[in-house]
Amino acid sequence: MLKFPKKVEYAILALQLMSDTEHGLISTKEIALHLKLSFEFLSKVMQVLNKNGIIQSYQGIKGGYKLSIEPNKLKIIDVIRAFDETVNLVDCLGNHSEKCIRLENCTLRNPIIILQEKVEKIFYETSIADLSRYDQLSKIKLEY
Amino acid sequence: MLKFPKKVEYAILALQLMSDTEHGLISTKEIALHLKLSFEFLSKVMQVLNKNGIIQSYQGIKGGYKLSIEPNKLKIIDVIRAFDETVNLVDCLGNHSEKCIRLENCTLRNPIIILQEKVEKIFYETSIADLSRYDQLSKIKLEY
DNA sequence: ACAAATAAGATTAAAATAGTCCTATTTAAT
DNA sequence: ATTAAATAGGACTATTTTAATCTTATTTGT
């Protein structure tokens, strides 16, 4: 339940990798190979990230992508929004939702808005760099 | 994105209604009618809630359901768990998930666990009674 | 016996998600 | 100029998940 779409998951994985690759460009092929992801699907993901200013593309034979935002400044919520996704615990709060049949005397809508905002806050406060930090922390712990 | 399954949404709605109906039993039909939900589908939902000790069923012609937990003590996370659902932002953390191909050197898994726990905390801290309180608050605001 | 309720298995329908295929365009190197 | 390797993007297909329905059985107060 409450699963990220794969496109968001792949995007985060790719961005993590790119944030480690400081020097120069990295191609979709390289990323797909390294992360064992479908090249085709990842291509689409990269295009969306590019269109939304999260990464920058360079075409042609020596082309590839690089981050256009510092990993510390790049928040999970930005990635989510790049895909036009939003946290919508219930339908009536969705992006293109038609009117709910019990809208007028709905006891759920307003409370859910409050919950949603709390969830969004988590994604607003967490950056790609934070994720890598969390990862390193958990791995240090395992060594002891 | 991150939508509650309908069964969880319907469950919360029904539980809110039941928490207002202090006196005695309420039947699935009554709830479905009042909330404009499919009777069939809601029936299933009620059965699950009953099986998991959240409501208590009384069979027979004067039968129905009543809450078996005080609305203040009944948390959103309990409802979620009644349906065997869990917050799983990515597949590899799912209930019955097979092993991920990049498990060993995955940079995402551990960080996501931390995020998930933060999300779960919200559902752990919010009760059915809280929801009604949020609702009333938002409606008072509108009047001014 | 009857009516109105819950219980539950099986099936179907619909929607969302994930993945693939194909073609076009760009650009560095030769 | 040609080629090779990269991104760009439209169209389509497959898969999975979610939602809903259908059917039958059981319970119980009148």
Image (spheres, coloured by chain):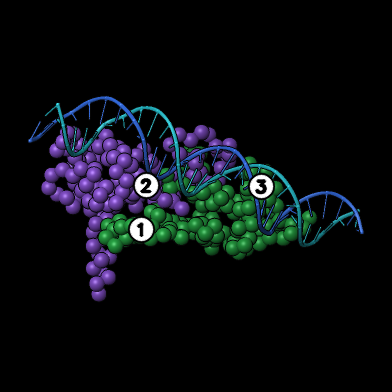
Chain colours: A green, B purple, C cyan, D blue
Say yes or no: labels 3 and 2 on the same chain.
Answer: no
What is the three-letter code of the residue carrying label 3? Glu
Say yes or no: labels 3 and 1 on the same chain.
Answer: yes
Q: Disc 3 vs disc 2: which is toward the camera?
A: 2
* Chain of the residue under the numbered disc 1 shown in the image: A
Is B63 positioned to the left or the right of B11 in the image? left
- The x, y position of residue D7, in whole percent, is 70, 57
Find out whether the residues at labels 3 and 1 contact each other: C-beta distance under 8 Å: no
- The x, y position of residue D23, in whole percent, is 34, 30
Is A9 positioned to the left or the right of A104 in the image? right
- Residue at x-position 64% and y-position 57%: A47
Q: Disc 3 vs disc 1: which is toward the camera?
A: 1
Residue position marked by numbered label 2 in the rendering: B6
Tell me which label, 3 or 1, sits earlier in the chain: 3
* Chain of the residue under the numbered disc 2 shown in the image: B
Is B130 positioned to the left or the right of B112 in the image? left
C-alpha span from label 3 to label 2: 32 Å
Residue position marked by numbered label 1 in the rendering: A100
The image quarter in which residue C8 lies: top left
Residue at disc 3, secondary structure = helix
Residue position marked by numbered label 3 in the rendering: A40
Q: Depth check: give the residue in front, C23 or A52.
A: C23
Where is C8 relative to A24, above or below? above
